[in-house]
Image (cartoon, coloured by chain):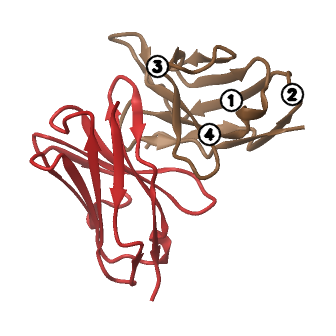
């Protein structure tokens, strides 16, 4: 199984400041034949299902604000919120879909400082 | 717009079999892969498995011996059965559409399944 490890577990950032979440996979999720990273990011607010933010590590899902960005390749990935808004308070998960069993990171809880 | 809705009993006794159904609207389940994911209260996400219309299934090895995912194209539904449940199976169960391009792109609202006598 590919183990996904996020850091930090929780993060408090002031409104308008940058938030950065890291995700590392125990093996590469880069598919060499198409040069795509099979890595997704999700946002989960209390009482709601996860919402897809990014796929292929950096492709923004339709409707996701451009203050969110995804980057990285191979085994190291980052989710960045450039200017934190109150509505961004949530738990964020990374997930690999390179191979089954599909696996998620443990989640990072983002709060307002 | 693709929508998914889980339905199930809410409460199951230990050692019994959990049965949940996901009804899909706005898309045919004959396309894509369809998956179940669960989340114990206050914890993270665990992929249970997926099914495809050819009857192809893939399960998480941690649950494989107890899980069956099946599809009913005539009702545009797919189902989860988990046998020999224990308190550790208490969780919110989500159904989701899975794409090998996008990951899990559409989710149901989730249904809480409690295992208790």
Report the residue marked by disc 4.
A5
| Vertical relation: A76 (above or below) B78 | above
Report the residue marked by disc 2.
A15
Position of residue A3 measured from the top left corner of the image (x, y, whole percent): 52, 41
Give the mark, 1 or 4, whose residue is nearer the N terminus: 4
Q: Colour of chain B?
A: red
Tell me the distance, in whole angstroms, between the alpha carbons under discs 3 and 4: 18 Å
Q: Pointer 2 indicates a residue of which chain? A: A
Kindly check if marks 3 and 2 are in contact, taking CB atoms under 8 A apart as contact: no
Left or right side of B31 for A31: right
Tell me the distance, in whole angstroms, between the alpha carbons under discs 2 and 4: 26 Å
Residues at discs 2 and 1 both on one chain:
yes
Report the residue marked by disc 1.
A22
Q: Nearer the viewer, mark 3 or mark 1?
A: 3
Report the residue marked by disc 3.
A56
Question: What residue is shown at x 56% (from left), y 25% (from top)?
Answer: A75
| Vertical relation: A79 (above or below) A34 | below
Q: Nearer the viewer, mark 2 or mark 1?
A: 2
Residue B26: which quarter of the image? Answer: top left
Give the mark, 3 or 2, whose residue is nearer the N terminus: 2
| Vertical relation: B36 (above or below) A86 | below
Tell me the distance, in whole angstroms, between the alpha carbons under discs 2 and 1: 20 Å
Kindly check if marks 2 and 1 are in contact, taking CB atoms under 8 A apart as contact: no
Q: Which chain is brown?
A: A
Q: Residues within 10 Å of mark 3 (few under 14, many from 20)?
A: many
Q: Nearer the viewer, mark 2 or mark 4?
A: 2
Q: Residues within 10 Å of mark 2 (few under 14, many from 20)?
A: some
Tell me the distance, in whole angstroms, between the alpha carbons under discs 3 and 2: 28 Å
Q: Nearer the viewer, mark 3 or mark 2?
A: 2
Q: How many marks?
A: 4
Tell me the distance, in whole angstroms, between the alpha carbons under discs 3 and 1: 16 Å
């Amino acid at each position: 199984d590919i183990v996904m490890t996020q850091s930090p577990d929780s993060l408090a950032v002031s409104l308008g400041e940058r938030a950065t979440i890291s995700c590392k996979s125990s093996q590469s999720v880069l598919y060499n034949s198409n040069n795509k990273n099979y890595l997704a990011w999700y946002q989960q607010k209390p009482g709601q299902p996860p919402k897809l933010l990014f796929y292929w590590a950096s492709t923004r899902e339709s409707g996701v604000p451009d203050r969110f960005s995804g980057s990285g390749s191979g085994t190291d990935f980052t989710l960045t919120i450039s200017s934190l808004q109150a509505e961004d308070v949530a738990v964020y998960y990374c997930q690999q879909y390179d191979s089954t069993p599909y696996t998620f990171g443990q989640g990072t809880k983002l709060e307002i400082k | 717009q693709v929508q998914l809705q889980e339905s199930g009993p809410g409460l199951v006794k230990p050692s019994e079999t959990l049965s949940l159904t996901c009804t899909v609207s706005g898309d045919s389940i004959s396309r894509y892969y369809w998956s179940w994911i669960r989340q114990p209260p206050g914890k993270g996400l665990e992929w249970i498995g997926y099914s495809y219309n050819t009857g192809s299934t893939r399960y998480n090895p941690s649950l494989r011996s107890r899980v069956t995912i099946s599809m009913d194209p005539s009702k545009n539904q797919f189902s989860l059965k988990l046998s020999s449940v224990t308190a550790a199976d208490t969780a919110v169960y989500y159904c989701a559409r899975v794409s090998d391009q996008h990951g899990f792109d559409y989710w149901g609202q989730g249904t809480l399944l409690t295992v208790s006598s």
